[in-house]
Image (tube, rainbow, N blue to C red):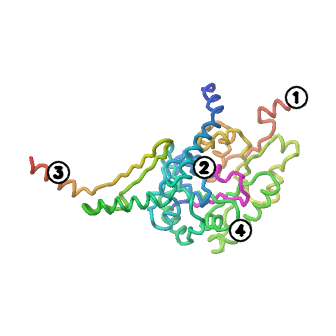
Amino acid sequence: MKFANFFSRQRSASTAHHRLQVLLMHERSAGGNPDLIPMMREDILAAIGKHITVDPEKVRLKIDRGETVSRLEIDIEIPTPIRQTLERREVHLR
Amino acid sequence: MAQVVVVTSGKGGVGKTTSTAALGAALAREGERVAVIDFDVGLRNLDLVMGAERRVVFDLIHVVQGSARLSQALIRDKRIDTLFLLAASQTRDKESLSDDGVERVIRDLRPSFDWIICDSPAGIERGASLAMRHADLAIVVANPEVSSVRDSDRIIGLLDSTTDKAKRGEAIEKHLLLTRYDPIRAGRGEMLGVDDVLEILCIPLLGIIPESKDVLHASNVGSPVTLNNPASTAARAYEDAARRLKGQQVPLVVPSDKTTLFGRLLGRRAA
């Protein structure tokens, strides 16, 4: 344990260097636009809103800015009544 | 209902962000619900020190301006689930922080947390005054060094005159957190001692954080020192300070050169 600690400590400068590289790459690029994600969220909500009513409070966005790709996760909670209707329709179809 | 704490100093580079992260994590580790807010608009760093820099979607400005909800902007810590971060905006200027907006954010956060810790930017301008405005309690971070102590004195004056609490005629609680304290140099009389600083600033001492390589290591890897290396002297000093914040009586021992291995070696050599 002590031994592993010793080595991870030795390497913390390279960890810092790598974290900074990835972060600054994102900040220097256009992806650093602070309005990009709010704008995308509005567009996505508007598109979904054409079909179902979504509570904006129930829309969660997560981002993970990686070295080669970034991952944007959008988690939208769809109200249950619609799901019930869908299920009913499914039963009907069967 | 949360206690609102501002971590402030006037001078830059004394350890406000490091201390915000370390104290926030120490409190959250004991089960307290903690939100840390970065008020350094344009020069955010709390996200980096806490290792959440890749995960910032919305920031304080988005919430203040209403383009994101608070629940969407709060980033939950991956290690402790009662610790949350509200990042500052990196690309806008601090004029985007409206008085009303900040007041609303603090008011909305209060019921859901035990602690709201506001990491102030350096200086005495807008960002710093907004960070301290709603505070119930202030942690003044200082290094045992003349310019830092002078700036702390100036900040104490502002806390007593410009905060909401002061304006209501109430006393704002102020605590000193002495960071980067080097017991060996203080012992040799090369650095201001704890008593020197306390005599000048006249506010109670919350803790003394010894100069430690573990602090740099923790920020390198993006983890508050109280999580990254809880056994280290710096982490233990932060843990004690966090307990004092909660009102617990924790005896305060001034680190001396005899308490460090290096000091002991030196002592032996000198003897």
The answer to which of marks 2 and 1 sits earlier in the sequence is: 2
Q: Is residue B186 left or right of residue B210?
A: right
Q: Nearer the viewer, mark 4 or mark 3?
A: 3
The residue identified by callout 1 is B269
Q: Position of residue B236 (x, y in %)?
A: 66, 41
The residue identified by callout 3 is A87
Q: Is residue B152 left or right of residue A90?
A: right
The residue identified by callout 2 is B21
Which element type, helix, strand or loop, lies under badge 2?
helix
Which element type, helix, strand or loop, lies under badge 3?
helix
Q: Are marks 3 and 2 on the same chain?
A: no
Q: Position of residue B94 (x, y in %)?
A: 60, 66
| Start-end of magenta stretch | B3-19
Amino acid type at image mark 3: Glu
The verdict on residue B10 being magenta is yes
The alpha-carbon separation of the residues under discs 4 and 2 comes to 24 Å
Residue at the image point whose x is 64% and y is 52% from the top: B17
